[in-house]
Image (cartoon, rainbow, N blue to C red):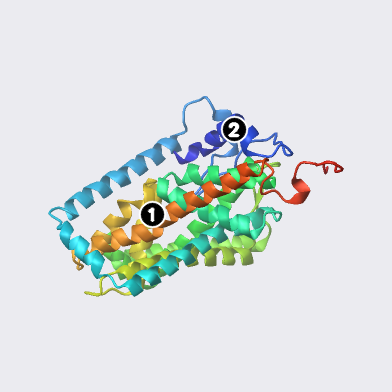
Amino acid sequence: MLGRLGEVLEHFQGKWGAVFRPKMRQYKDASAVSVPGRCETAPAALQAQIGREPISWNKIGIALSATIMLVSALVLSYRLRDLDWRAVATAVAAVSPAHVAGAAFFVGCGYVTLALYDWFALRTIGARQVPLRIAAFAGATSYAIGHGLGAMVFASAAIRFRIYSRWGLGLIDIAKICFIAGLTFWLGNITALGIAMAYMPEAARALDRIPACGNQAIGIAALSALSAYLLWVWRKTRVLGRKGSSLTLPSGSMTLLQIGIGLADLSCCSLVMYLLMPGLPGVDFIPLAVIVIFGTLLGFVSHAPGAIGALDAAMLIGLPAFDRAELVATLLLYRLLYFVAPFAIALAGLALREAISAGSGSPMAAGLPPSMRAPTQGRSCPH
């Protein structure tokens, strides 16, 4: 599933390119770069694979997604058997309005960090003509809609292409943005889980049932791999891909900033859950954050909308001491604030933007900087 985004983008460009991208740029090489994170495209060699049998990684990805969703569904059906939904409604009403307001604030902060994913990626690939407001809109909107639909790989890429093509970016640029954004996501996860498992192995044991020494070894290994990557990019400039579709990785110092953005994102979503948790029996922030990050990561791999199933199962397994009705109430509020509300706002914002563009009389020119718009009387087209 993930490995097919390159094919989808190729078909998308051939069928709808005349509508979605400006005509001033044509790309002869439509090969893509591999993306390991939230937006994964196929390697450059995928172009030669079109029309052939799917590569084995696609089947593995589909099987893994289906397995996670199936196991999550079985766990939920077992854990939520005989659940009193009236008690859930009572628990929702009992949550402090101040805590809900605080959680909503950190939801906003979380989507600011998601906007920074795109800002960082654009600066990395050298697309400095895209202003901050456009990067913020594209980043927040693509993730909000991708979270809501569950098809993050396809939805976020299509939305980015729709927005950034008006600023002179093509398919290869979108693939690069997806790669850098995905790298930010994974570096943040590796750092957060590595530190937590190395220094607080018991926090992960509640979920993965691995002995503390095993979790500590995994955490140390993750941090060692992260350190090796940092040294690798710090020594000299690292370039991935071939000429025409190559990508220069962030330097060592910029990678530290990249990790900081990823950690801020994970911290915000964990704080949202923390503020919505029941007061009793109580839980510390770090153990809860480990469970939330694990659940979110599994939900991302499963491609389920809003990590549904995986995140819920992780919370119910990792926090058995809490009342089930109160925990379900927390999860419902979390989804409403972190997924449903941003999804609705993003759809409305995207629709409004499209309506304004259509009303301008030149949809393709709307949003372009003056130097890139079509010529008018007395002006010649810039070369």
- Please tell me which residue is depicted at 15% across the width and 56% down the height of the picture: 83
Q: Quadrant of the N terminus?
A: top left
Residue behind mark 1: 340
Residue behind mark 2: 16
Task: Identify the disc placed on residue 229.
Answer: none
Q: Residue 202: horizontal and vertical position, in percent? A: 30, 70
Q: Residue 185: horizontal and vertical position, in percent? A: 49, 57
Q: Residue 183: horizontal and vertical position, in percent? A: 53, 55
Q: Are marks 1 and 2 in contact (CB under 8 Å)?
A: no
Q: Is residue 297 left or right of residue 71?
A: right
Check the image and name the residue furthest to the left.
82
* Element carrying mark 1: helix
* Element carrying mark 2: helix
Q: Amino acid at mark 1?
A: Val
User: Could you say which is closer to the camera, residue 23 or residue 2?
Assistant: 23
Q: Is residue 216 visible?
A: no
Crowdedness of circle 2 by 10 Å Cα count: few (<14), some, many (20+)? few
Q: Is residue 335 above or below residue 260?
A: above
Crowdedness of circle 1 by 10 Å Cα count: few (<14), some, many (20+)? some
Q: Amino acid at mark 2?
A: Trp
